[in-house]
Image: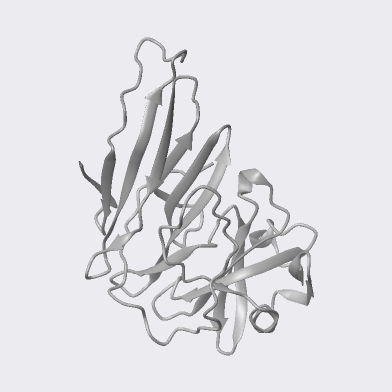
Amino acid sequence: MVPVIRPWQFVHACALIGGLLIISTAPLKGQEWASYKPSLRSQVARLERVEAESLLSQFCVSITDTKNVGLTCKTLSLGPAFAGILDNQFHPKGVIFGHFLDSGSEGAAISGWSAETHPYHWGGTLLLTRDYDKWKPVWYKSGLITRSCEKAERIDGRELLVCEFEDGGMGHRYHSLYGVDLRRPSTELNLALADSFQSDFCSAQRQVMEAVTWGCDRRSFSVVIRTPEWHRLPSGACGPHPPKRPAASVQLEFDATDVGRRPMASR
């Protein structure tokens, strides 16, 4: 499953923003890469127990740590915005800080899981906002995966996320690159997709997503999708209009236009 394509505006900062809270330099290894290599340099940090207890004091009754499961937060009952938390249990894994709700606020997006299954990508995101010296929970969204992300800054100073995820099903392996606006967590934008499969009853292909390349102003970026292998199956059921081979290499460019994405010419 991949996020739904929606209209969106997207920009990225020219440099890393100073003054943000950084609690760890250890990257989160929650994303398992089975068939692909990551295209982003993730800024999501692994969340240790001491930091989790500090960040989640307004969300958790208690936090335990076990070898098999890791951190387990016994949550408070906080209403419909947290309906994705089942049995009052949340397992925090990683955190990324930023100005997600407005340029003057401090936010923390905590990636983890409750009781999600495959349709929800086995996880979700908890958003916190800082109110003086306390971190207050805003919402929890099942299926919003922020395990591997980079921050992007809008012209007004508010920050967005560019994230990626690998998943599979029905013989396909997907590498998805998508944008997340934490002010509107239900409007993810699918930016680029690499899809590899042995058979769709007509053809087979292998696709690769290259590393994301940022523009000098960090308000635009591009990514290349390569299709090094593609062929029709000898006994494939292609129908009256068989598909053509995808371009060997396509570069997609993204910027802060009303469209959000400008596909460039194949090469």
Vertical arrangement, residue 235 with respect to residue 49, above or below: above
Q: Tell me the residue at 56%/33% (across/down).
A: 171
Q: Nearer the viewer, residue 105 or 194?
A: 194
The reply, left or right, for residue 66 in relation to residue 159 is: right
The reply, left or right, for residue 213 in relation to residue 142 is: left
Vertical arrangement, residue 142 with respect to residue 237, above or below: below
Vertical arrangement, residue 3 with respect to residue 147, above or below: above
Q: Position of residue 151 (x, y in %)?
A: 41, 69
Q: Does the rendering let one see residue 107?
A: yes
Q: Tell me the residue at 34%/75% (across/down).
A: 157
Vertical arrangement, residue 28 with respect to residue 56, above or below: above
The reply, left or right, for residue 85 in relation to residue 235 is: right
Q: Tell me the residue at 71%/66% (across/down).
A: 91
Image quarter for residue 132? bottom right
Q: Position of residue 235 (x, y in %)?
A: 47, 13
Q: How many marks?
A: 0
Say which quadrant the C terminus sits in: top left
Say which quadrant the N terminus sits in: top right
